[in-house]
Amino acid sequence: MSAVEEKIIGILQENRIEYEAVDHEPVYTNPAMAEALGVTEAETVKSLVLMTKEKRMVVLVLPGNKKVEWKKAAADLGTKKVSFAKPEQVLERVGCEVGCVPPFGQLTPLPIYMDEELIKKTYVYFNPGVHDKSYKIKGWDLKKVSSPTVFK
């Protein structure tokens, strides 16, 4: 079990959040994750580490079926331009590879920005810092433990 996953379990237990761990083959995209889990892509969580023009790193948390709307993301983050953070920056700051970044702010000093659609889902699935496992929790509980800035 990875250090990131251990921290996630601690956060979920501390907040009395019910969760289910699901093992599957390694997945590197949300469509593959949805297929492995037998759920819709919209029920999977996409956590993207972005870098603002001012070199501020943030985590953008979206339903797996959504693409980044760059101009809207920049506006939501109060900056002129955002781009993906470099993979080595993500590994250094978050402690896991791009593609399995968890949607939890407590794991890193990075602010979390979350699409409100996720909160409305009965259940959502996210990677706990590894590619071959997903965690299932209620959408509302994801908001509760992530303490995000929510946007439409």
Image (cartoon, rainbow, N blue to C red):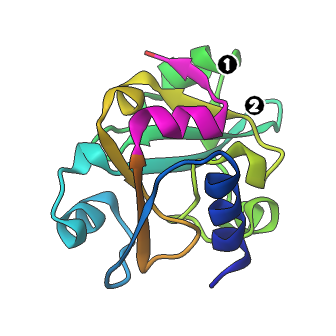
Q: Give left or right: position of 122 versus 51.
A: left
Residue at the spot x=15%, y=64% of the render? 38
- Magenta stretch bounds: 138-151
Q: Secondary structure at mark 1?
A: loop
Estimate how packed mark 1 is, as few (under 14), some (14 to 19) or many (20 or more) residues with alpha carbons within 10 Å: some
Residue 98 higher or lower than 110, as above or below: below
Report whether residue 96 is seen.
no
Residue 42 higher or lower than 8, as above or below: above
Residue 79 drawn in magenta: no
Q: Nearer the viewer, residue 145 or 97?
A: 145
Q: Nearer the viewer, residue 10 or 131?
A: 10
* Residue type at the position of mark 2: Lys
Q: Quadrant of residue 115?
A: top left
Q: Which mark is residue 53?
A: 2
Q: Give left or right: position of 4 versus 17.
A: right
Residue at the spot x=82%, y=30% of the render? 54
In the rendered image, which quarter contains the C terminus?
top left
Dots 1, 2 in contact, CB < 8 A: yes
Residue 33 higher or lower than 61, as above or below: below
Pick whichever of labels 1 and 2 is earlier in the sequence: 2
Q: Give left or right: position of 1 versus 100.
A: right
Which residue is denoted by mark 1 in the rendering?
Answer: 80
On the image, the x and y values in percent for residue 131 come to 46, 76
On the image, the x and y values in percent for residue 12 come to 61, 54
